[in-house]
Amino acid sequence: MEREPRPSQVQIRINSRRHSGVIHPLQSSPAPASAAASPGVNPVEIKHFKKWVPWLIPLFVVANTIVFIIIMYVNNCPKNSVSCIAKFLGRFSFQPFKENPLLGPSSNTLQKMGGLDVSKVVDKDQGWRLITSNWLHAGVFHLLANMLSLLLIGIRLEREFGFVRIGLIYVISGFGGSIFSGLFIQSNISVGASGALFGLLGAMLSELITNWTLYSNKVAALLTLLVIIVLNLAVGILPHVDNFAHIGGFLSGFLLGFVFLIRPQFGWVSQRYTPAAADKPKFKMYQCILWVVSLILLIIGLTVGLVMLLRGVDANDHCSWCHYLSCVPTSSWSCNTQPASCSTIQTGNQLNITCSSNGKSGVYILPNASNSQIQGLCVELCS
């Protein structure tokens, strides 16, 4: 007894204008009998590739938000500072604007909770800070900006490529951003998911390049993405913004996109049904070359960067102009972001504090002042 022939499968690409100019790879399925063109030919119907249900990116957003709430609980501004913002929130109230204009905790709390402090990474073998710093945020404004961007960028990518590849790009890009930041910014605490976010932007750019033939509006898609990237990097020249983490994350994500987001290329068809003998999907030579080169550059870059960082190398000593990539001084702001330093004299209940950088001093009635209280007052005097 003869078996019924199994429906053959073929993957093809059509010149579609759906989904912002992206021509999605398609999968075939059997066509109805009426669609058969001739005897002996098994036509198949075009279907889109599976769309993933995004859940990892929303989970990342929830995780970042929960971590921020925990940080504010640990910060406990009323106990550790002289003045707080939104005191009705109790221990969740924010540090003064002069100390933290983003509505968030103190730098001491961020350091204690895992912020990127290069001295601790190098001298105390706390390399885990290269990862934990990506899950901390300096304030409500910082958190909102990053999480909204993550939802807009990440959900689209996860729907197209799945949670495994996008999750890996997010985590590895954040790690790469931390390494690049640590090589150039060694005197301040760095926190935030910006490096991972720029990694996703970099991956979008490399995905467009490696899957170039799958796009209909190629030039428009490329120009739009480049404008978004340039504008976001331009914001990094403002003071107190760690643009080195942005650049490091972007470069890492750009290379990862060639590795993880590669798509097989397909022949062009215009009909709804096509014979099963149609061209099979395959990768083009330029895609394979980009895949190999990007993987090698990524491994070498992360390894060399990590070794240099752990050896205490200050990249600014080898690049006199690189500091302009993170902050360009103007008449409106200064790029001097050195930590505040003060001298203190405690006389009974009276505390005298003098800022070392500008000479300003203040007298406070504060018996048994804690280190965090003194640091907060010092920041106010020096700002």
Image (cartoon, rainbow, N blue to C red):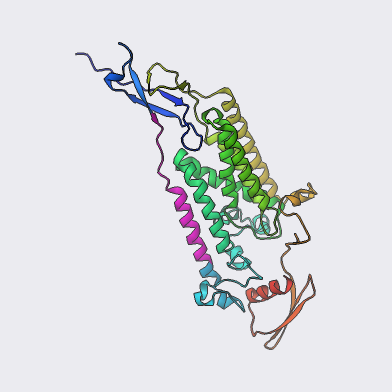
Could you tell me how many numbered marks the image carries?
0
Q: Is residue 121 above or below residue 70?
A: above
Q: Residue furthest bottom?
A: 348
Which contiguous range is marked in magenta?
47-71
Relative height, residue 225 to residue 358 (above, below): above
Q: Main secondary structure of the magenta part?
A: helix
Q: Foreground: 328 or 165?
A: 328
- Counting from the top left corner in percent of width and height, residue 35 is at 31, 19
Is any atom of residue 150 visible in this view?
Answer: yes
Which residue corresponds to the image point at 54% horizontal and 27% vertical from the top-left? Answer: 213
Answer left or right for 374 relative to 17: right
Who's the residue at 73% across and 54% down the image? 327
Compared with residue 151, is residue 46 higher up or lower down, i.e. above or below?
above
Residue located at (48% from left, 27% from top): 15
Q: Nearer the viewer, residue 208 or 369?
A: 208
Closer to us: 312 or 282: 282
Q: Position of residue 310 (x, y in %)?
A: 67, 50
**Residue 174 seen in the figure:** no
Image-based side of 42 in relation to 229, left or right: left
The residue lying furthest to the left in this view is 1
Q: Residue furthest top?
A: 39
Residue in view at x 67 percent, y 45 percent:
305
Looking at the rendering, in which quadrant would you find the N terminus? top left
- Residue 63 part of the magenta segment: yes
Task: Find residue 253 and report its image quarter.
Answer: top right
Image-based side of 123 in relation to 295, left or right: right
What x and y, as percent, mark residue 378? 70, 74
Q: Quadrant of the C terminus?
A: bottom right
Q: Residue 166, how many percent across, how many down? A: 50, 42
Magenta-span inclusion, residue 52: yes
